[in-house]
Amino acid sequence: MSEQKKKLVETVKLRKYFPVRAGMFKTNHVQAVQDVSLHIFKGETLGLVGESGCGKTTFGRTLIQLYHPTSGKIIYDGKTIYDSENNIHENMLPYRRKMQMIFQDPSASLDPRMTVGEIVGEALDIHKICATKNDRQDRINELLTKVGLNSEHSNRFPHEFSGGQQQRIGIARALAVEPEFIVCDEPISALDVSIQSQVVNMLEDLQEQIGLTYLFIAHDLSVVRHISNRIGVMYLGCLVELAESYELCAHPIHPYAQTLLSAVPLTDPEKNRHRQRILLQGDIPSPLNPPSGCRFHTRCPYATERCRSEMPELKEYSPGHYAACHMLEKSS
Amino acid sequence: MSENLLEVRDLRVSFYTPAGEVKAVDGISYDLKENEVMGIVGESGSGKSVEAYSIMGLLSNPGKIIGGSVTFEGEDLLAYTDEQKRAFRGTKASMIFQNPMTCLNPVYTIGNQLEEALRCHDKSISRDEAHKRAIEMLELVGINNADRRVNQYPHEFSGGMRQRAMIAMALICHPKLLIADEPTTALDVTIQAQILELMKDLQKQTGMAIIFITHNLGVVAEICDKVSVMYAGHIMEQGPVDDIFYRPAHPYTQGLLRSMPNLEDTSHTRLIPIEGTPVDLLDPPKGCAFGPRCEHCMKVCLNNQPPMVEVGENHRSACWKQVQEMRMQQADGNRPEGGSHE
């Protein structure tokens, strides 16, 4: 990736805590996203992987401000749209035309009482994109054909479609306002195996045609590696490693990224038999009460005293390859 | 090789719904020997779980077994009375499910539920001994502080530990067959890796047979000796795991393998998806279930269901293309010797 590439979206120490009431006067916080700083270049796909509860979905939603951030800074296309320190909080409506989202569960994210035409057209109405009724219908038909459906589908209801088709409707809705940036939150994990690749290919085609930028959130590493230019690995709210996708899959340097990669079952029986696996002990700690210092130290085979007390910073170890680990600091 | 532990022959299961008959399982056959791990892969709605439920006698209304036979150690399971079925479940075969939270009773302790499984089948075991066995079993499945954990409730366990507890419960009476219905689907990859390693270990120690139902081809490649690929209630292809992954014969299996991104691929190649949508089981195609989506589809595929043909050692596939190829080969073989060398 060249240096001249333009940053489209950038977050600086973005943080999202959810309050949990623990008694009348006491409130605890689920530390869902902990100071995540990253940027996404125009036209690229940034993949975000991690186990459930690591905050990847929360990060995506906070980024386009479906959740109000607790603190941090969000910059879109050079303009600060949220900054907790300087109290900047831009009106999101004009930005919603540029940032859209595709959700995980296609049937839950479509209103069952609206026809497909109404679902896709709603966005057009809110942003007053089409002047006349005919324009609007033409635009809806065009969107539906773009995602591989027919214009006659616009009078049907979501339940009449299969899961893969419903996801296509969700994508058409996101495309309706001609966005530049789409957050794809596990767009394929609810779909059947034979349908997944259809949707992945479609997302890639659309990116090529319209020049979209994606934040692709998923837990399936092989799909993320396929579609992304760069991949970020999250653990318990923190970004622990960020690198170009081939680099990350070939040479992960953070112990957690290494474990995650070695845990993915390969579709190759012979390689599986000879593979040395790094098995982690135990489960993810609760984000309500995360471990001190490096959040991975409770399960990390290399944890030292320093890891227990001090949180490591994300640092660049080779060009474009970032990781947050004390152990790497020492060796470099 | 030893005799077959489980023989399923032409099993047919239908659901009679208000919208019509759904043939969830439509004539499947396979054998399972002791010490063997068989994977059943298929998309949702392909009938893989229904098939397992019918073996265990857990099929509920409106599902009905309408044909075929299931033989376990020479005995016909479908002829069992309810009482015999109860004795069979747990001691000879047991099952673990996808979501451990819905399968564990939230108001009883883990120990209580393990002991119940044990004392249900053998009334002579004392409470103390059952408790001891429960602790042993939890230790076996890798739960730390088992003597403390045994008195805890399911909500105090994490997802991975609940699945371990489920496995402990399934194995406490030493069954010869374990049916695992998507045991790792609800788990994260790192936990999935732990559970798979555990199941492999336990399988080696006890020598039980496992039917492993999943939609994840990677998991199959990891744990199974042989694989059956199901689509719309039919077995499309079955064979040893290496044959299925390195020499897939059926277009559906080939398509599935091709459509999956490979983690170790270094170049960015476009995925080759299987076109079309899954079968509507209320209105299945007349011929081969995969016909309408198949790139090699011929006229015969749309009208007639293909037979299972041997394509290698223990490797069978149900596809008209292979039937034709085989006929051609036979025709070649029958020709006088000089003729075929032209």
Image (tube, grey):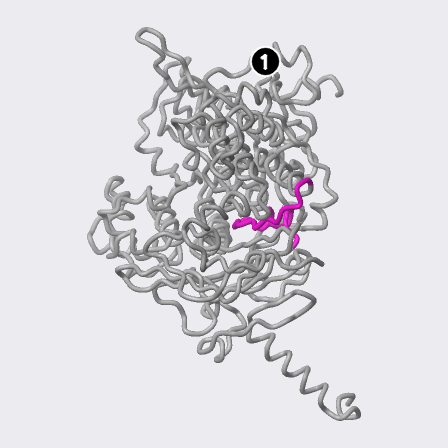
Dot 1, crowdedness within 10 Å: few (<14), some or many (≥20)?
A: some
Residue at 42% in and 49% down: B83
* Image coords of residue A107 (percent x, y): 34, 46
Looking at the image, is A218 positioned above or below residue B308?
above
Indicate yes or no whether the magenta region holds residue B230. Answer: no
- Three-letter residue code for mark 1: Gly
Vertical relation: B246 (above or below) B326: above
Q: Nearer the viewer, residue B136 or B259?
A: B136
Q: Does B217 appear in magenta?
A: yes
Q: Secondary structure at mark 1?
A: loop
In the image, taking residue B136 as reference, residue A150 lies left or right, namely left
Residue drawn at point x = 46 percent, y = 27 percent: B112
Q: Residue at x 65, y 70 (%)?
A: B311
Percent x, y for residue A22? 36, 12
B293, B288: nearer the viewer: B288
Image side of residue A212 versus residue B206, left or right: left
Chain label for disc 1: A
Q: Which residue bears the numbered disc 1?
A: A293
The x and y percentages for residue A301 are 68, 22
Q: Which quadrant: the C terminus of chain B? A: bottom right
